[in-house]
Image: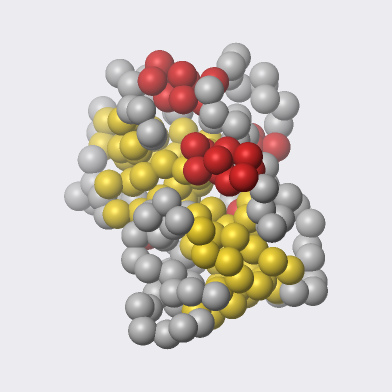
Amino acid sequence: MLQEQIRNDIANATVRLPRPEGLGVLVDNGVIITAAHCIDFSCEGEMALGEYFIETIRTPNSECRLAVIAVEPVADIAALSFHDDQPFSTDELFLDYCRNTKPVPICQNNEANDFRVYIYTHHSTWVTGLAKSNDNDGKLGIRADEPIIRGTSGGPVVNEKGELVGLVSSFSLVTEHLRECTGQASRPHLALPLRISNRIFADRDTYYDY
C-alpha cells in the first residue's frame, strides 16, 4: 500500500498541461517529464524568439512557461525545463515550485516479476494495478484495476516505494467501458535521451541552486 505521505508528495509533484489536456511530473534537477503527445510540439506550436518551443504548465499555485528540452515521439515521452539560453518571465515561479516540492525519484531497477503499481489521475485519484517490466522495448506492461481515462496521459506510475517506474502514454489502453485496463507505459530511465537522463540523475546542485 502506498503511504499517505508518499501519495501527497507525488500529488504535489504532478503538474497539468492545459493544451492538450494531460499531466506531467517533477523529477530531479528541475525537469518535468510528460507524454510526448501531451505537448503542442508542432510547426504551429508556440515558440520563443523563433528558436525554442515553449509549453505552459500549471502547478498547484501558479502557471509557468518552460522550454521543451527533449521529445521522443516513438517512446511517447518528453521533457520540459529551463533552457540555458532562454529565460522566461515565469522562471522564478517555477524555481519556487521546485524549492517547495519534493521531486519524484525515477526507478532505475528492471523488475521482472509482477509488482504493484499506483497511477495518479487527472481527477486527483489513484488507480492501482500490476506491472511487469519488458527489457526488450523499454516499456512497462500494466494491468490496471480500473480504466485509465483520457486526461491522465503523462501522469506518474509509481511502485510501492513511490519511485517513478512509468508514465501513462499512448500505449496505455484508454477506455471507460472495461473493468480492467491493460496496456503499456513509457519507462523514463530507458526512454529519455541520455543527455536528459544525465541531467536528471546529476547532483541536485549541479544545475540550479535550490
Which residue is located at x 36 percent, y 84 percent?
177
On screen, 14 above or below 157? above
x%, y% of residue 159?
A: 68, 57
Indicate the quadrant containing the C terminus: top left, top right, bottom left or bottom right: top right
Which residue is located at x 29 percent, y 54 percent?
21
Which residue is located at x 58 percent, y 66 percent?
128
Q: In this view of the protein, can residue 166 be seen by the observer?
A: no
Q: Which quadrant of the figure has residue 152?
A: bottom left
Q: Looking at the picture, tell me which residue is in the foreground, 101 or 3.
A: 3
x%, y% of residue 130?
A: 65, 72
Q: Looking at the picture, tell me which residue is in the foreground, 165 or 124.
A: 124
Q: Which quadrant of the figure has residue 66?
A: top left
Which residue is located at x 34 percent, y 37 percent?
58
On screen, 208 above or below 149? above
x%, y% of residue 124?
A: 42, 51
Outermost residue to the left: 44
On screen, 103 above or below 139? above
Q: Looking at the picture, tell me which residue is in the foreground, 77 or 16.
A: 16
